[in-house]
Amino acid sequence: MTPVAVLGLGNVLLADDAAGPSTIHWLQNHYEFPPGVSVEEIGTPGLDLLPYISGREAVIIVDAVSADAPPGKVLVYHKDQIAMALTRPRLSPHDPGLAEAVACAELAGEAPEHLVVVGIVPASTETGMGLSPQVREAIPVAGARVVEELERLGHAPRSLPDPLPDRPWWEAGT
């Protein structure tokens, strides 16, 4: 298991809920990551998030987040802010269960020392494929925040000289 994980959460069939997977796609097409860093899109694991975060040194999660901010706004939450979310009820089966997974990892002594959520405020999470213009513009901003976190942790990725196209497979027909 790599010590650092960058995880994209979200459902690509629910419009801007694909912010996490889209950011992961953007990162993989623009950067080469050093050994010890895994970058992957994991869908909507719910409480099954636990194996993805347990035993890691650091975890960076990218996801659409509900916040009192305009669509496309990129927000960063740190471990102590995520733990405070334990008091809020889960509102839907999609809620990632992050606070609960972190609490379980803490109890087992397996929680990552560093945990960051890079969130993008969605315009819509209705059924449909494709990002809103605001969220599409936020993807490189969120990607840059992930890169900043990796640099701060001493795991700086290297920019690819010829980035790959930014259109992910789930938007190929849209």
Image (cartoon, rainbow, N blue to C red):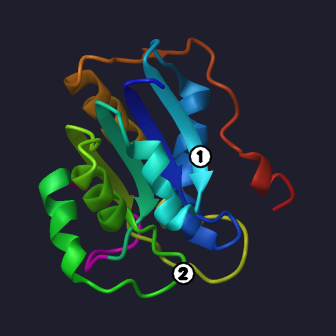
* Amino acid at dot 1: Glu
Tell me which residue sits at (52%, 33%) in the image.
Answer: 39
Cα distance in 3D space between marks 1 and 2: 18 Å
> In which image quadrant can residue 25 be found?
top right
Local crowd at mark 2 within 10 Å, few (<14), some, or many (≥20)?
few
Residue 132, numbered label: none
Look at the image and say whether residue 76 sits in the magenta stretch: yes
Whether pointer 1 and pointer 2 mark residues with C-beta atoms closer than 8 Å, the reply is no
* Amino acid at dot 2: Pro
- Work out which quarter of the rendered image holds the C terminus and state it: bottom right
x and y, in percent, of residue 28 in the image: 58, 30
Q: Is residue 49 left or right of residue 73?
A: right
Is 94 drawn above or below residue 169 in the view shown?
A: below
For the stretch drawn in magenta, the main secondary structure is: loop
Local crowd at mark 1 within 10 Å, few (<14), some, or many (≥20)?
some
Q: Which residue is mark 1?
A: 41
Q: Secondary structure at mark 1?
A: strand
| Residue range of the region highlighted in magenta in the rendering | 67-77
Marked residue nearer the N-terminal end (1 or 2) = 1
Tell me which residue sits at (35%, 30%) in the image.
Answer: 147
Q: Residue furthest front?
A: 108
x and y, in percent, of residue 97 in the image: 41, 68
Residue 93, numbered label: 2
Is 95 drawn above or below residue 103 in the view shown?
A: below
